Amino acid sequence: MYRSSMFNGVFYFKRALSYFSTMFKYLLLTITSLAPIGSFAQSQDSVNLAQQMYVAYYGRAGDPEGVNFWAAQFDESNNLDAVLSNFGNSQEYSDNFASLNHEELVTGLFQQMYNRSPDAEGLAFYVARLESGAATLASIAKQIADGSQDNDGLSLDNKIAVANSFTSRVESEGISYASADITSVRTLLAAVTSSASSVDTVLAEVLAWVSQSSTASDSNVIMTTNFGSIEIELFPEQAPITVANFLAYIEAEFYDELIFHRVIRGFMIQGGGFDIAGSQRSTFAPIALEANKGLSNVRGTIAMARTNVPDSATSQFFINHVDNLFLDATGSDDGYAVFGRVVSGMDVVDTIANLPTIALGIFADLPAEPVTIESVVLASGSSNTPLAKAGPDQSVNTFQAVYLNASESSESDEGALSYSWTSLAQPSGSSALLYSRTSANPYFTPDVAGDYVFELIVNDGTENRSTDRIVISVSDLVF
């Protein structure tokens, strides 16, 4: 879970005066729709840089605590590369991007900032820097953002503006913003382009946004495969026809013992139509397309497969391995209907997507090792999410033993918690080590003044987990 801290939601726009009137409208709309909140301790430039990194690197708005923390790091550090390197060291990165290759990672940065793929020359240049170790992905994200021009620059500024508006609302209204919400927030930002109308539309959606982490879903489903389980949250409000169709197939146990027959790394994994012998099952009648419903084909979402005929989807579905915004509905393209998102088991999706494939009969991208859907069932309606609490921030002196305390973390219905602590940042020159990292009460002795930041991850023995951060501010001991 994320803890709130003060955030100043003032927008910073830097584009040419030809865009001034449009930008002023966005600023005015945000000011009038969100109550102003307390002043922010760090400079506005650092706030904007922190938000820019969340948009570019993760494709989402930063949580208030995260923006607060990284803005402070940017203000106080004289080594920007080190701060950027630390920014990229997170569980969120490991969960969502660690399995992607360098081309997919760089392409993702361009998609998240500009809604487009890089040109071949730019892609080759940044991939080479990654492969050689000359730059980290986070430093490349900043380099790309700093070079934004024309519509690309306006698109990025618009995304940062909307992200600031979102973070400001989360902060001022005390709204929960946790890992379960990330996909929906990424979908919001994916809809922001260089156009004025896209900003108007998404700002309205920001004001109506409801945290998924604070509302239990009655329509989550568990898809069990021979490679592991995938939990999927369905979106019955946005895609009622598609969700009802999917649930009807589940009730009929249609998907049991079918396979994922089309697997393309860096694109998607598709299943729900054929058994292991390659035989296609008889389906229900095709359904109407629900592609233009405010949902986007971002990484981790599930959508219906279909033929070239818009209203032709039946049982087959696909899970997006990366952001595939070109599959969204546009004025000239009917698009593909998103109707849910993976909330647990994205590592299983990655494993399947990375399997070697073969061409066999009508199948061009068939996994060489069969991927079987053993069952798809409704998940339990009870809340199964643990709550991590790393304790309050502390102020101590150097060479004073510091004990962290996660004992206030709450268990889920699934069982006892396990703990894992990670050091996110510590002052330059420090050699302090955190001991007992897998206990509720690890400890360390700070040897250099500055801020030590730790992340707590709690797990209940299943794939359910929660995170929290703590900052230990250390001053020099005066004798």
Image: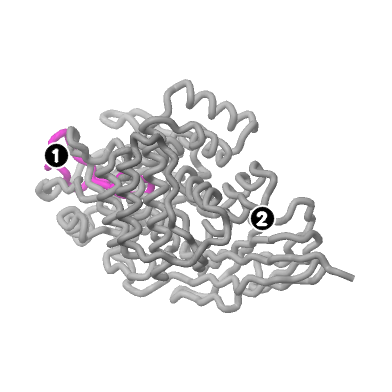
Q: Determine whether 458 is above or below 145 in the image.
A: below
**Is 7 left, or right, of 263 in this rendering?**
right
Q: Residue at x 22, y 40 (%)?
A: 329
Q: Is residue 315 visible?
A: yes
The reply to whether discs 2 and 1 touch (Cβ–Cβ < 8 Å) is no
Q: Residue at x 53, y 70 (%)?
A: 388
Q: Is residue 282 visible?
A: no
**Is 311 left, or right, of 473 in this rendering?**
left
Magenta-colored span: 296-317
Question: Which image quadrant for residue 262?
Answer: top left
Q: Which residue is mark 1?
A: 310
Q: Determine whether 414 is above or below 201 in the image.
A: below
Q: Position of residue 314 (x, y in %)?
A: 16, 46
In the image, what residue type sits under mark 1? Pro
- How is the rendered protein coloured? one colour
> Considering the image in quadrants, where does the C terminus appear?
bottom right
Q: Determine whether 230 is above or below 410 in the image.
A: above
Query: Crowdedness of circle 1 by 10 Å Cα count: few (<14), some, many (20+)?
Result: some
Q: Residue at x 80, y 71 (%)?
A: 400
Query: Is residue 47 in the magenta section?
Result: no
In the image, what residue type sits under mark 2? Ala
- Element assignment for label 2: strand
Which residue is nearer to you in this view: 50 or 322? Answer: 50
Tell how many labels. 2
Q: Which residue is mark 2?
A: 425
Residue found farthest to the left = 285
Residue found farthest to the right = 479
Does the magenta stretch mainly form a helix, a strand or a loop? loop
Q: Earlier in the sequence, mark 2 or mark 1?
A: 1
Q: Which mark is nearer the camera, 2 or 1?
A: 2
Q: Position of residue 288 (x, y in %)?
A: 11, 47
Query: Crowdedness of circle 2 by 10 Å Cα count: few (<14), some, many (20+)?
Result: many
